Amino acid sequence: MNGDLPEVTRSAIVRGPGLETVMAGDALANQRILLVEDEFFLADELARSLQAAGATIVGPAASIRNALNLIATAGHLDAAVLDLNLRGETAIPVADALLERNVPFVFATGYGHGFVPVRYRHVKRCEKPMNPAKIVRALFG
Amino acid sequence: MEELYRILRTGHVQTQGIVDTIADPMVVLDSSLCVQNASRSFFETFQVFRDETIGQRLTDLGNGQWNIPELQRLLGDVIPKSTAVINYEVTHDFPSIGRRTMLLTARTLFHPDGASHSLLLVFSDATDRMARDRAKDMLFGELRHRMKNLLGVVQSLARQTPIEGRTAEEYRDSLLGRLGALIDSEDLAFAEQGELGVEQLLERTFAPYASGGANTVIEPGPPVQLGPRTVMSLSLVLHELTTNAAKYGALSDPEGQVRVRWQVEDGKLHLHWAESGGPAVSAPTATGYGTQLIQSTVSYNLGGTVELDYPQGGFQAEIVVPLGTASQSE
C-alpha cells in the first residue's frame, strides 16, 4: 500500500488533533518506521503524518503474517508502531520478532486489549487513534 | 403490672416487626458480640436458622462463616472508636452463598442504664450492583474507544476526500455522503443481534435512491451475520459504489438498474454488483479516491478481494470477503 500514498512535501507541517501534533518536516528524516495496524483509515492517517515528518513508512501491515514478512524482508527498521490486536489475534509474535532485532517499538492499544506479557510491560502504549507527535516522543524520546 | 407487661410485649413485637421489614439483613449484637436478634432477611440471605443463630457469638455462627478478619477488625477496632460506621466494604467467600461483597453499616446503641450497649449491624449485599458497575465501566470504555476510532476514520476521510478541481460545496457533499455511510453502519452495529446482515446494509445504502421504481434490486440471499467492523467497511464500500452509480452509472438514468446478489462459498461472502441500462461505460483513466477507498477497505480491512469491471453495458463489481474475518467483531 505504501506505493499508493502520494508524495508528501517534506517541509509540510502536520496539524492533526490537539496542539502536540505539530512536527517539523524533518523530525523523522531517514527513519524507517514499520506500521502494523489493521484499520486502514487509521494506518493511512498515521502513515501520512509520519511521512510528512520525513519518515519512510514500511507497511502498513494489517496481519501478523504480513508484519512478520516485512520484518524479515524489508531491511533495516529504525522503529515500529504495533497494534496489539490484529483481527482478533495478539500481535505478540510481531513484538518478539522486533525484540530479536532490537527494533524499538510502541504499542497502539484499543480498549480491552490490555494483556501484555511481563517482558513487554515496559513498552510504551499509545491509545488509538494515535497522535503522531506522541508516538515520536515515545519512540525517540 | 399486667398493663406494663402488655406495653413491653407490644413494644417488643413492634420492634421485631420493624426489624423484619428491613430489606437488608440486620443483626443486633450485645457488648460481647453475641447475637441478640436478627432480621428475617438475615436468615434468608445467609441461609441459616434462627435457633442456631440467636445467643451465639457472631464469629462462631454458621461454622465460622463470619470469622472474617476484616469484620473482626471492624468490630474490635473501628466501632469502639466511632459511634457509627457506614458502608464498610467486606468481600468474603461464604460457604453457602459464595463470594459476596457486603457493605456493612454499624451503629452502637447505648442503653439507658449507661452500663451496657448493643450493636446494630446491617449488611447490604453489593455484589450484583458492583458487577453491574464493572460491566457498565467496560461498556463505557468500549464505547469511548469505538468513538475515538470512528473519529480517527472521519479524520482520514476528511483529509483524503479530494479537493482538487472541486468547489467547497462539492467537497462538503462528498464528505457528508461518506460520513452518512459511517452513521448508517453505526446504527446497524447497535441493532439487535440477527438484524446485522448484508440485506439490511444494502437496503440502507439504497434507501435514498429507492424511488419506488425497480432501479435497485436486492436479490434474496442467505442470511450473513456481520461484525461491527465489517459493517463499517462494507457500508463505506457500498456507499462508494452507489454514489458512483448515481453520478455516472445506472442510477444516473431513470431507466437504469443496479442489481445486487450474494452467496456464501467456502466461508467467503461473494457480493456481486451489476449495473445495466445506464449510460455507455468506459474504464476510468485514473484511479480516483473512491476506487482507492473501495480497494483499500476490502483488501486491507476485510482481507478480501475486489474486482471492478467496465463492460460497455454497465459497471460490475465482485467483492469477496472471508467471513472468518468478516463476522468477527473488533
Image (cartoon, coloured by chain):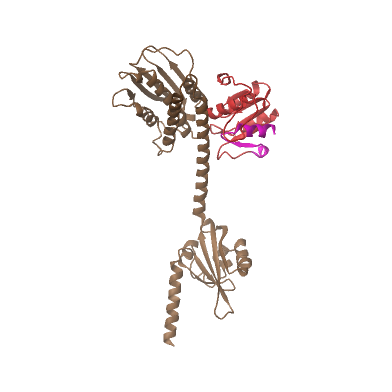
| Residue at image location 46% in from the left, 64% down from the top | B41
Closest to the observer, B199 or A20: A20
Rendering colour (chain B)? brown
Q: Is residue B259 left or right of residue A134?
A: left
Closest to the observer, A123 or A47: A47
**Residue B53 locus on image (x, y percent):** 52, 69
| Residue at image location 65% in from the left, 31% down from the top | A136
Q: Quadrant of the N terminus of chain A?
A: top right
Q: Is there any visible trace of residue B312 in the rendered image? A: yes
In the orientation shown, which residue stands out farthest toward the left?
B213
**Residue B292 locus on image (x, y percent):** 49, 21
In the orientation shown, which residue stands out farthest toward the bottom?
B1
Eyeballing the image, is B235 above or below B45?
Answer: above
The magenta segment: A117-141
Q: Quadrant of the C terminus of chain A?
A: top right
| Residue at image location 30% in from the left, 18% down from the top | B255
Q: Give the quarter of the image for residue A102.
A: top right
Q: Is there any visible trace of residue A62 in the rendered image? A: no
Rendering colour (chain A)? red
Eyeballing the image, is B100 above or below B50?
Answer: above
Q: Give the quarter of the image for residue B18.
A: bottom left
**Residue B249 locus on image (x, y percent):** 38, 18
Closest to the observer, B245 or A21: A21
**Residue B215 locus on image (x, y percent):** 32, 22
Is A123 magenta? The answer is yes
| Residue at image location 43% in from the left, 67% down from the top | B21
